[in-house]
Image: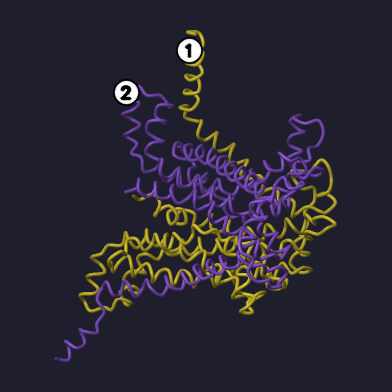
Chain colours: A yellow, B purple
Amino acid sequence: MKRSGNVLKTIRGALNAAIAWKRTPAIVLIVFCAFLFMPLYWTLVTSLKTTKEIFSWPPTLFPKSLTLGHYVKALIHSPIFGNILNSIFYSLTATVIVVTVAALTTYGFSVYQYRGSTKVALVFLGTRIIPPQSLFVPFVVLFSKLGLINTRPAVIIFQFVLVYPLSIWLLKGIFDKFPRELVDAARIDGASRIFTLLKVVLPIVAPGIGAVAIIAFLWTWNAFMFPFLILNSPQLKPITVGIFHFVSDRGIEWGPMAASSVLAIIPGVVFFIFAQRSIVSGLTLGAVKS
Amino acid sequence: MSQSERMNKYKLSDSGFGILCTVPGLAVLLALVAYPIGYNLVLSFMSYKRLVFGGFVGFQNYGWFFRSKDFYLSWRISALYSLGSAGLAFLVGMILAQALTAVRRGRAFFRTLVVLSWAIPPVLSGLIWKWILNKDMGLMNYVLSVFSLIDSNVAFLVNTNLALLSGIVATAYVYVPFMTVFINAGLETIPPEFYEVAEMEGADEFHKFTFITVPLNIKQMLFSFLVVWMFTFRTPDVFFALTGGGPGKATYHAGLFLVNLIYRYIDFGKAAVVSIMLTVSVGLVVTPLAFYIFRRAD
């Protein structure tokens, strides 16, 4: 009995020493980051290999010869280029609409409080307890009655329903922190409330709104199932749906698929490399501050 | 009544402006949510198959749902999958968040590497992992064979249990950044003095973790776990790309069950019931926990 207690104590001591060692965090990070980075690297490398090399065993970690053939095939001989433009169009349009409307809404209830205004954000957020999947059926039926199946507005309307409440939740954290005195000063000087928003509030909260806009953009960019259900024409599909062009009964064309994946992931990667700090603070503000 | 008094009468009060800003957006949103939800409820009592409207059928669709084997199967798979994905992402996120707060050099670099997989849409993660886990040309089989962990190549996506596990890995992969970022944000609000005092009192790493890190960070931990659980319970994107629900129905996620009814069987009455049950299931779990988390916050 006593012995096993000693063994446990030794193990605990050893683990403690391992955790407390000053190099442990760096080693843990290097190992995990290697794992997390591997799929991205593998996709990139696959997209640059020749078809013959892709289908050879053992797989080569470093490509023997590089080719841009899969990119040519994806961009010129398939609808993928149009799909990417569609993704950009859907994401930009949804983001501009959502962030403009959400900023005005949040400015209203956060700065000019009324009875119950502190609970409004929760009402907006509450609509998101309903899974988007549960809205598929009614939206498909209603859109078909309105003639919106296989159209661009259908994608954007659905995305608005999903992203608008979340953007309000994120913006609330930003507007709630805004110094009230600045608004009061502008109002006393005779500025209208809209003028105050445009010339006093927005310039100061712009970085935060930019972060929310990036998040909204990526949310729309990642959307898959609803566009898949309502879009038939290849020329309307976003990249997440269009990429299945390379999946058929005869198998998957891994080369062009990998090339298209790389292209589909680039916007997100670029945003995360250059605006990671503001994206992270934009996301965590509402959840952490209290 | 003077001119200025008349002007004042029509001038909007501050709270009036606040309400004016809120109401239109809220009205549009509720119309876009409440009307479809109501419509869905009505549909669930109808026969509406292959775009042929068959009138009201009472609780027939609900009866079908609760007798359907697919319901129990897909709900069980969704539960296993969502708990597995959220659990795995949570575990890795927790380790990474701790390491990120503790690391001395290159924090910004590691932070960027950690969040990169966030850029991958879940459906693409399914496709990418399908390639990595490929039996004949896949990276995973290669790595395992290099370390002599397997004798012959493993068909990950053909084995019932491995297919589900593969889905969990492909999903956790895209949610690790979210978990890390949220837990890390919570960790950074804990004053370092707490740990210093604890150390002086002779606390070891385990004490520090269980008595400082977890209790002071519980809200972020619960929140991020709950969000990922909710996302993964309802979203079948990864399996759509990775396994298509197979082998057999081993990865027949509740979301795939629903999508199949809409897309393949075009049976909107039954699909309506499945979507209502999906909402009810998620709501029953999330609502009380969300209230608990928000109450704790105040």
Q: Residue at x 48, y 40 (%)?
A: B97
Whether residues under marks 2 and 1 lie with C-beta atoms below 8 angstroms apart, the answer is no
Q: Secondary structure at mark 2?
A: loop
Q: Secondary structure at mark 1?
A: helix
Q: Could you tell me residue A243's position as x and y percent?
A: 72, 62
Please say if A167 is above or below A154. above
Q: Could you tell me residue B193's position as x and y percent?
A: 31, 34
| Residue A5: image tag | 1
Q: Residue furthest top?
A: A2
Q: Nearer the viewer, residue B156 or B137?
A: B156
| Residue B20: image tag | none
Q: Provide the residue designation for mark 2.
A: B201
Is residue B123 visible to us here? no
Is residue A179 visible to us here? yes
* Left or right of residue B257: residue A267: left
Q: Amino acid at mark 1?
A: Gly
Q: CA distance from mark 2 to mark 1?
A: 23 Å
Q: Nearer the viewer, residue A20 or A176?
A: A176
